Image: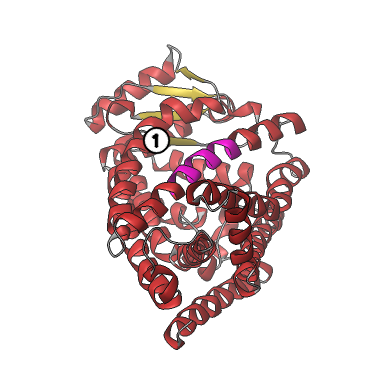
Amino acid sequence: MTAKASMVWTTLLILAGIFSLAFIFFTLFPGQVPDAAWQYFTPAEVERARHYQQTMRLVSILAFLAQIAFLVWLVASTRAAAWSDGALCLTGGRYYPALVIYFVLIWLSLKAVALPFNFYSSFIVQHQWGFSTQTLTSWWLDYLKGGVLDLILSGAGVLLLFWATGRWPHTWWAAAGLFLSGWLFISAFLWPLLVAPLFNRFQPIPEGPTKTMVTQLAGRAGLKVKEVLVMDASSRTTKANAYFTGLGATKRIVLYDTLLADYPPDEVEAVIAHEMAHWQRGHILRGLLWGIVANFLLLGLLYAVLKLTFTYEIARPGPYPPHLLVAMLLFIQLVSFLGQPVQNAISRCYETEADRVALELTGNPGAMIRLQVDLARKNLGDVALPAFIEWLSSSHPSPLARIQAVEKRGKSK
């Protein structure tokens, strides 16, 4: 490893360490809640939500650090190269079968590292706080289905990536970026049709006041809404939510059945208006385009760092040695973590814009404020995030910030 390469890896690890320590510090010591929050929330509600969010954040950052530590250990101990040599020996030197075996071994190892954190946060904690309605069997079925899907898709991606390193030794990163760009659009189109139904059941919203309200909102927004679906979220959680998904002919708005069951009609209208605003403003397409730019940048940086770090390995003819997969994963995880502030800043801008448009569509600031209050209370959302936590990891403005923004716009009318 060259001195420049050592400096790059050291810088990435130090920055990730600093960000992680700051994240843990502000999770444990979030500071005082602004006085404005007491107009809507009691001290007990704020404290309960903070306790829940503290648990979830700590588990999340510890899971990330555990996986980073495991990948660093593989590289630093030369275990990564030894496992690669073992896979090649097992297959009699046949490259692609060895790559598949090596990938599966690394994938299973990372899953094993993450599993305790995943199980604790998504099953045990959710039951402790009264959110989860899943049985242990149901949780494992979801976990296994998600795992098989991830194994197949990521395995295919790794095979294509390493094939590209042999086919285009100096420009594979651009070829991979082009392929990934196409895949982002394909997956956005197909996800609602092929993947989402593996985990939940979806039904068209029934005839009645809610469907009429959707039609009226769509008319005001200038949208042709083909599908508004209700998802059986109650089979897994008591939390309420909604989302906009799909691309082109597969675009749809999905409402949790818990939202329709537990929230009054004017708050449901505010939710649907918010999702329509995402649609009207083209946020999914814009997000995909930002993702494409980020992927090209990430892959280009990855190539540059690998060239510095593994000069002799990548200079050889043919595809990269399998053990470089570990360094690739380590780099991608570190840079993705450090790049979260940019990604989340864009997301918060979209959410703020969607709130603004939703208010224009409904003309009901009171309902939007009550919605944010009810969501924060029932879903245990952190009323006012510490600034660093919001900057690093929050895709949405805090409930208090959203409430204050609605109040400000309501007064200006």
Q: Quadrant of residue 81?
A: bottom right
Q: Which residues are magenta?
A: 146-157
Instruction: From the viewer's side, name the closer residue of 45 and 168.
Output: 168
Q: Quadrant of residue 217?
A: top left
Q: Residue at label 1?
A: 244
Expressed as whole percent of the image width and height from the top left, the position of residue 239 reads 61, 37
Image side of residue 265 versus residue 173, left or right: right
Judged by its main secondary structure, the magenta piece is helix
Instruction: From the viewer's side, name the closer residue of 167 and 280.
Output: 167
* Residue 344 in view (yes/no): yes
Instruction: From the viewer's side, name the closer residue of 297 and 398.
Output: 297
Q: Secondary structure at mark 1?
A: strand
Q: Quadrant of residue 226?
A: top left
- Color style of the picture: secondary structure
Expressed as whole percent of the image width and height from the top left, the position of residue 85 reads 60, 61
Image side of residue 47 versus residue 219, left or right: right
Is residue 155 rendered magenta in the image?
yes
Graded by Cα atoms within 10 Å as few (under 14), some (14 to 19) or many (20 or more), the crowding at tag 1 reads many
Is residue 401 rendered magenta in the image?
no
Image side of residue 302 versus residue 79, left or right: left
How many numbered marks, from 0 up? 1
Instruction: From the viewer's side, name the closer residue of 336 and 410.
Output: 336
State the residue at coordinates (46%, 88%): 3
Q: Is residue 242 above or below residue 401?
A: above
Expressed as whole percent of the image width and height from the top left, the position of residue 20 reads 59, 71
The amino acid type, in three-letter code, at marker 1 is Phe
* Residue 408 in view (yes/no): no
In the current view of this chain or complex, which residue is farthest to the bottom?
3
Q: Is residue 387 above or below residue 138?
A: below
Image side of residue 403 versus residue 26, left or right: left
